[in-house]
């Protein structure tokens, strides 16, 4: 990106109420068959338009064509039985009934490539596409085949790499892997999580990102955050190894979070998508509050490597709130951009 402080979003954006139940994770679709296919494309166009109207520089599909950032990808794979369900604890935080890995996993056909081509046709701006990361994928499944978290993650990394290469060929500029699980399983991240991520980006020439966060603004996550104390130092465990990895961009949560900003020094040299919008509140940030967060991050991130962003996805938020937050992000970034250019 030539533009200083290009803005983007971490992931999901609210869906229109005619497509899915608003403010709801895993909301069922309200349309069916070809009408659903067309409706998803219409929603993608609206979502793109909202981002562009708000002045977002690196745009995305806002995950309009998927029900959930992890599940939808897995639904397209062979080897996972969605009718055979077990209860597991996701990210050591909440119990969920999850599908079972019953045999070798594979990707019989592309998952999001047609959607990415459609987005590419609609805009000249750089586009970012999010995929789940290998570790976060295995954390939402019961494995009755490989019986090894590492082995299953490695198989998923190979599958993600196939998808990522096709997304790159479809014209995606940045491929992002969502790894909220990186904030929980530190030993695994350092032992094999980052290696699996590097396997997923093997051979790519587009930019690559990893999004780590404290999750959507849902109750299970806000309750968990209350147990983390006055300083959230989770990133500290994994930043040194991420800093040495081949990933280009690290996306993380900085707004209203108790992450000590000086932890960013541990990833010096990387591009950083700095979360300057809180997704756990309906209160829309002022541009000045966004600017204040970006200025703090600038103490540790070079200006040409700082990408203002949201803390996480915004699917649980009302549409008008999310739109207000996108506008605040743009306006806040504009304040700091002017300050930098005036120097
Ligand atoms: Zn997130």
Image (spheres, rainbow, N blue to C red):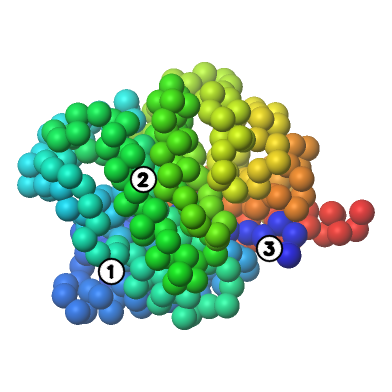
Horizontal side of residue 100 vs 94, given as left or right: left
Q: Kindly state the secondary structure of the residue where label 3 is placed.
A: loop
Mark whose residue sits in front, 1 or 2: 2
Q: Kindly state the secondary structure of the residue where label 2 is placed.
A: helix
Visible in this render: residue 332? Answer: yes
Q: Which residue does the numbered mark 3 point to in the structure image?
A: 1
Picture residue at 58% right of the left edge, 68% below the top = 126
Q: Residue 19's mark? A: 1
Q: On the rendered image, what quadrant is the N terminus found in?
A: bottom right
Q: On the rendered image, what quadrant is the C terminus found in?
A: bottom right
Mark whose residue sits in front, 3 or 2: 2
Q: CA distance from mark 3 to mark 2?
A: 27 Å
Q: CA distance from mark 1 to mark 2?
A: 31 Å
Q: Which residue does the numbered mark 2 point to in the structure image?
A: 157
Visible in this render: residue 48? Answer: no
The crowd level at tag 3 (other Cα within 10 Å; few <14, some 14-19, many 20+) is few
Q: Earlier in the sequence, mark 1 or mark 2?
A: 1
Q: Position of residue 320 (x, y in %)?
A: 47, 62
Q: Position of residue 288 (x, y in %)?
A: 72, 50
Q: Quadrant of residue 14?
A: bottom left
**Residues at circles 3 and 2 in contact by the CB criterion of under 8 Å:** no
Horizontal side of residue 302 vs 278, given as left or right: right
The residue nearer to you, when weighing 11 against 231, is 11
Q: Kindly state the secondary structure of the residue where label 1 is placed.
A: loop
Q: Position of residue 4 (x, y in %)?
A: 75, 59
């Amino acid at each position: 990106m030539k533009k200083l402080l290009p803005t983007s979003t971490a992931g999901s954006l609210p869906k229109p109420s005619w497509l899915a139940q608003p403010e709801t994770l895993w909301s069922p679709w309200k349309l069916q068959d070809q009408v659903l296919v067309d409706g998803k494309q219409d929603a993608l166009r609206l979502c793109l338009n909202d981002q562009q109207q708000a002045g977002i520089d690196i745009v995305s599909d806002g995950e309009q064509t998927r029900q959930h950032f992890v599940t939808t990808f897995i639904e397209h794979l062979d080897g996972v039985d969605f009718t055979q369900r077990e209860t597991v604890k996701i990210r050591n935080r909440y119990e969920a009934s999850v599908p079972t890995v019953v045999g070798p996993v594979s990707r019989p056909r592309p998952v999001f490539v047609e959607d990415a081509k459609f987005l590419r046709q609609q805009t000249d701006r750089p586009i970012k596409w999010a995929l789940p990361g290998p570790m976060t994928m295995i954390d939402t499944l019961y494995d009755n085949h490989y019986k090894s978290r590492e082995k299953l993650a490695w198989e998923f990394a190979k599958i993600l790499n196939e998808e990522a290469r096709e997304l790159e060929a479809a014209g995606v500029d940045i491929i992002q892997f969502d790894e909220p699980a990186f904030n929980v399983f530190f030993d695994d991240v350092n032992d094999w999580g980052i290696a699996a991520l590097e396997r997923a980006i093997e051979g790519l020439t587009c930019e690559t990102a990893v999004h780590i966060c404290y999750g959507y603004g849902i109750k299970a996550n806000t309750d968990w955050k209350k147990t983390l104390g006055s300083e959230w130092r989770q990133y500290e465990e994994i930043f040194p190894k991420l800093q040495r990895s081949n990933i280009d961009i690290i996306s993380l949560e900085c707004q209203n979070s108790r992450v000590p900003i000086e932890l960013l020094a541990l990833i010096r040299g990387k591009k950083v998508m700095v979360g300057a919008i809180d997704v756990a509140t309906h209160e829309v940030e002022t541009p000045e509050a966004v600017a204040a967060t970006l200025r703090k991050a600038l103490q540790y991130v070079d200006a040409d490597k700082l990408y203002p962003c949201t803390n996480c996805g915004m699917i649980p938020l009302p549409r008008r709130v999310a739109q207000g937050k996108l506008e605040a992000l743009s306006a806040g970034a504009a304040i700091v951009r002017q300050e930098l250019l005036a120097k």
